[in-house]
Image: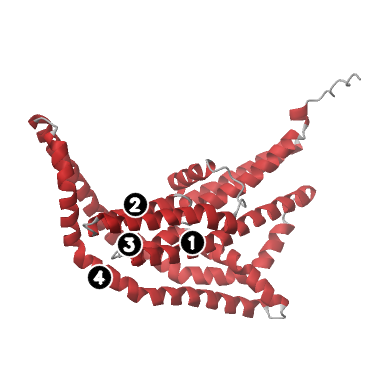
Amino acid sequence: MKSRAEIRFWLIGLAVFIGLIYLLRPVLLPFVAGMAAAYFLDPIVDRLERMKMGRSLATAIVTIGFFLLFGGAIGLMIPLLETQIFEFAQNVPDYAEGLQNRLRPLVDTLLSRLNPDDVVKLKATAESYAGTMVSWGVRAFGNLLTGGMAVLSILSLMLITPVVTFYLLRDWDKMVDRVDSWLPLEHAATIRIQMTEIDSTLAGFVRGQALVCAVLAVFYGLGFSMAGLDLGLVVGVVTGIATIIPYLGGIMGMVLSIALALAQFSDWMPVVLVAGVSLVGQVLEGYVLTPNLVGDRIKLHPVWIPFALLAGGALFGFLGVLLAVPVAAVIGVLVRFSLARYLASPMYKGSTPPPPTML
């Protein structure tokens, strides 16, 4: 009876927690970002503490240094990005004309194989969908301007995240000790073992994936720029950062870079070069960087990763996609622990001992 009451209590608490996360998901991004930054920077602060530096001073130095370094990197890139974006905007009409000229023979070939009635129906359908897409785009853009959620999210990331990072980082050890003191005494040792496993899994994934993103951002940015892609640096940096989302980030970058190359170049060789950079980046990520920097720390079968991404996006939007793999890794640790307990329990083995083996 006691065991059932405990299980009911923890299940109700978990359901309430998930419900609150779901309801508050529009405002959680800066706090999640601050928590991730604090988790990432805590070992550096601990090392400064071991060097006889006060926790508050060490936290201030690390937080200010981290955001100055991050902001300085963005500041150095802004002039280059601004130049490329301005040039790209000027060349958009030429890109549209070149893409139209490239696709016209294909469209003419397809239309020549259809009878006149089918061509009329196809054009009517295309015009209808085109009007729908334009109206949807105008409405979405208007909602973006009037709602201001994007601007609010950017401002909250810039203003709230550093503050959240500082206070979480300063009180990190105290919070860990406080939560540890709340653990049920009968199961505290078991919970600590699992939390240590979760910490090891998350630390390996977060720090390794951050290095993977940084290396790929440099590789894609230089590669696309050397291939002659007008927006190469922007697309390369965005693709590198997007690889924090396994699979989807690299695929999105490949599609975007090849589409821009098709619109920009009239010759196939530059398009092949851009596609080659994307392909080499995929191979570099999948066979060199991720195995060596991330490895098998998340201990998830590859099939579960896209499922986690889709489920996280469906439930919590962009924030869910960002957190899908770490949360799936935590769930994996808990599932493996539960499975091990089940395999060692009478529920699996049965209550009657096996018959003795005859020699």
Judging from the image, what secondary structure is the residue with disc 2 in? helix
**Disc 1 from disc 4: Cα separation:** 26 Å
Closest to the observer, 173 or 63 = 63
Which residue is tagged 3? Answer: 148
Is residue 143 in sight in this rendering?
no
Cα separation between marks 4 and 3: 24 Å
- The residue that disc 2 covers is 255
Q: Residues within 10 Å of mark 3 (few under 14, many from 20)?
A: few
Residue drawn at point x = 63 percent, y = 41 percent = 11
Residue 248 spot, x, y in % from top left: 43, 50
Q: Is residue 312 left or right of residue 171?
A: left
Circles 3 and 2, Cβ within 8 Å, touching? The answer is no
Using the image, tell me which numbered label, if any, was put on residue 213. 1
Disc 3 element: loop
* Cα distance between the residues tagged 2 and 4: 22 Å
Label whose residue precedes the other's in the sequence (2 or 1): 1
Q: Is 302 rendered above or below residue 118?
A: below
State the residue position of label 4. Answer: 86
Residue 227, horizontal then vertical, whole percent: 33, 63
Q: Residue at x 37, y 53 (%)?
A: 254
Tell me which label, 3 or 2, sits earlier in the chain: 3
Distance from label 3 to label 2 (Cα)? 29 Å
